[in-house]
């Protein structure tokens, strides 16, 4: 949930009236600090779901750029464009996964620039 600036001001104003200045700022900081983490490559919110205590299942994914980290017990599944791994994960595998995410981010930005730029034949003549 993304909160608009006007909504944030209204929340802070109400907290000041009800709890006083110092307590309101602490409560507001904790409330605003609990926003969803954003994807490093595309900037959209990351979907996170966990049943770790009950079944040992946990999933993190970005549906916009297509990466996923799924855990079930001791096995992890890492999926992104150009990279797939299933099994026990160590630090070197996470580094390789992060390198592939960075490469995908660079490619995504390059394709975005190409999409937004126009051909010479489509540009307006002066």
Image (tube, grey):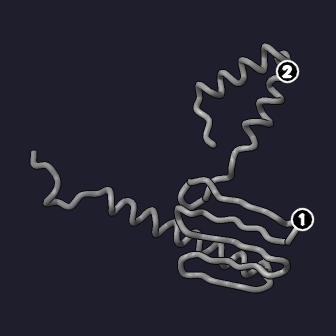
Q: Residue furthest front?
A: 54
Q: Nearer the viewer, mark 2 or mark 1?
A: 1
- The crowding category of the residue bearing disc 1, from other C-alpha atoms within 10 Å (few below 14, some 14 to 19, many at least 20), is few
Residue 88 image point, x, y percent? 80, 84
Q: From this viewpoint, which residue is outermost toward the left?
A: 126
**Which tag, 2 or 1, sits closer to the chain's start?**
2
Q: Nearer the viewer, residue 21 or 95?
A: 21
| Residue that sits furthest to the top in the current view | 17
Q: SS of the residue at dot 2?
A: helix
Query: Image quadrant of residue 10?
Result: top right
Question: Residue furthest toward the right?
Answer: 53
Describe residue 118's horizontal placement relative to residue 3 as left or right.
Answer: left
Q: Which residue is mark 1?
A: 53
Residue in the foreground of this view, choosing between 123 and 78: 78
Residue 89 x/y as whole percent: 78, 81
Estimate the x, y position of residue 79 in percent, counting from the top left.
62, 77
Q: Which of the labelled discs sits on residue 22, or is there none? A: 2
């Amino acid at each position: 949930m993304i909160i608009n600036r006007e909504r944030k001001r209204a929340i802070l104003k109400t907290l000041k009236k009800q709890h006083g200045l110092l307590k309101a700022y602490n409560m507001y900081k904790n409330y605003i600090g609990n926003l969803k983490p954003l994807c490093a490559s595309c900037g959209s919110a990351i979907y996170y779901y966990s049943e770790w205590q009950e079944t040992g299942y946990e999933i993190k994914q970005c549906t916009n750029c297509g990466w996923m980290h799924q855990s079930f017990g001791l096995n992890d599944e890492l999926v992104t464009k150009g990279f797939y791994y299933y099994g026990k994960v160590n630090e070197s595998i996470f580094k390789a996964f992060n390198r592939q995410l960075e490469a995908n981010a660079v490619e995504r930005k390059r394709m975005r620039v190409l999409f937004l730029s126009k051909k010479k034949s489509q540009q307006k003549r002066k």
